[in-house]
Image (cartoon, rainbow, N blue to C red):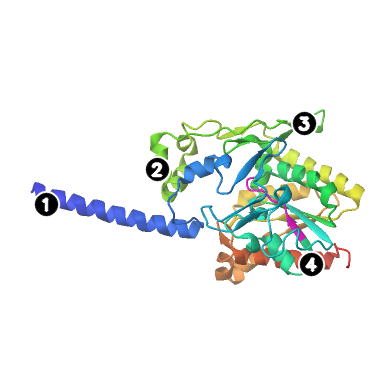
Amino acid sequence: MRKKLFLNLTLLFALFAFAFILLEIIGRLLGGYPLVPHNILEQRLGLSKRAYQSAYDSRLGWLPQQSSKDTNNIWNTEITILEDSIRSNGKVTASEKPSSPVILAVGDSFTFGDQVSDNETWPAALETCGVSRVLNAGVFGYGLDQSILRAEGLLDKYNPDLLIIGMICDDINRCEMKIRTGASKPYFSFENGELVLQNQPVPLPQYLKLDPLRQVLGYSYLIDRLLWRCCPKFWLTGTKDEFVLAHNDGMAIAVKLMERIDKVVAERKLPVILLVQYVANPTTAGRKRIEEFLQGIRHTGLQVLDLYADLESLKAEKPESYEKLFAGHMTPEGNRWVGRKLAGFIAVQNLLPRE
C-alpha cells in the first residue's frame, strides 16, 4: 500500500513538474523572455543590474554605457552604444552618416529598443525609410521627466531639425518616483506653481540583495508574474527601496513638462512629435490616463502621433498581425510598423526641411 502511494505521489509530482516547466516555457516565449535561466526578479529590481550595460549619471540617474558593444544580454541582441550614450542604428551610425536633416529621438525602453538589435529599433526603421539621420537617445526605464531632461541636454550639441519624444502610459507614473527599481532618479516637484528639479545630484544606486526564497523563486517567469500581480508587496518584501514615491502629482508634472519643452523648442523653431506608444492590449484605465494627459497639453504647439487608434484597428481587422507587433516590448516587425507610421506622419505634416 505504501509503495503504491509513494509511486502515485511520485507520478503526480512528475506530472506537476512537467506541466509547470511546459507552462514556464510557453509563458517565457509569449512574454518575450529568453529560455536562458536568469533571476527575473533581480533584473526587475535593479536598473544597476540591467539587461544592458549601464552607467551612473549624476543628472539623469543612469545612461547606457557609452562606447560599448556586446551581445551579452538576456536577449542576446546586438547593443552598440556610441558617444553621448546614443544607440547605433546598425549599419548606419552617427559617425557614418553625418548628413542633415537630423532627428533626435528620446524616450523610454520602447524608443531605446528593448529586446531587439541595433538595426531593429523604430529609430533605425525610421532612418531606413530615408526620412533623415536619426539619433536614438532613448533610455530603458526612463520616465517622461528624464526623457525631457535628456532632450534638453542634447539639443545644443546636435541641433536637430526635429525632436521626437516617445512615451508609454507608465512614463507619467514614473514622474512621481525618486527611486525606481532600486535606482535613484531625478524628479520634479511644484514650488509656487513652478517646476523644481529635485534629487540633484542623483544619489548613487543602491545594490539590492534578495533573500534565499527570492533568489530561487525569482528564476521562474510564472511565479514572478503571478506574485507581481496578486501580491507585489509580499513579493518585494526584503528588498530595500524598490519603488519610492516623491509625490502623487505625476499627471500635473507631466503636463507641465510638456509646456516646458514646448517653450524651449518654440524659441528654437524646432518641431516636435510626441509619439504615444502602447503595450499589447492596454488597459482601459491606462488609455483614460493617456487621454487625460493629451487633453492637458492640447494648448501647446506639440504635434501628437497617438498610435492607439491604428493599433486597435489592426487588432480588430488582422489580430494575427497585431500579435506579431509585440513580445513584451515591440518586435522588429512592430518597430518597423512604428517607423512607417512616423515616416508617413512626418511627410504629411511637412515637419522636415527638404534637402
Mark 4–mark 2 Cα distance, whole angstroms, equals 47 Å
Any part of residue 341 in sight: no
Residue tagged 1: 4
Position in image of residue 293 (x %, y %): 73, 47
Position in image of residue 44 (x %, y %): 53, 43
The local crowd at label 4, few if under 14, some if 14 to 19, many if 20 or more residues have their Cα within 10 Å, is some
Position in image of residue 287 (x %, y %): 65, 52
Closer to the N terminus: mark 1 or mark 2?
1
Query: Residue 131: which disc?
Result: 4
**SS type, badge 3:** strand
Closer to the N terminus: mark 4 or mark 2?
4
Q: Residue furthest bottom?
A: 318
Query: Residue 234: which disc?
Result: none
Closer to the N terminus: mark 4 or mark 3?
4
Give the residue displayed 53% in from the left and 57% down from the top: 76
When the figure is inspected, residue 332 is found, relative to residue 66, above or below; the finding is: below
Residue 115, picture quadrant:
bottom right
Magenta run includes residue 323: no
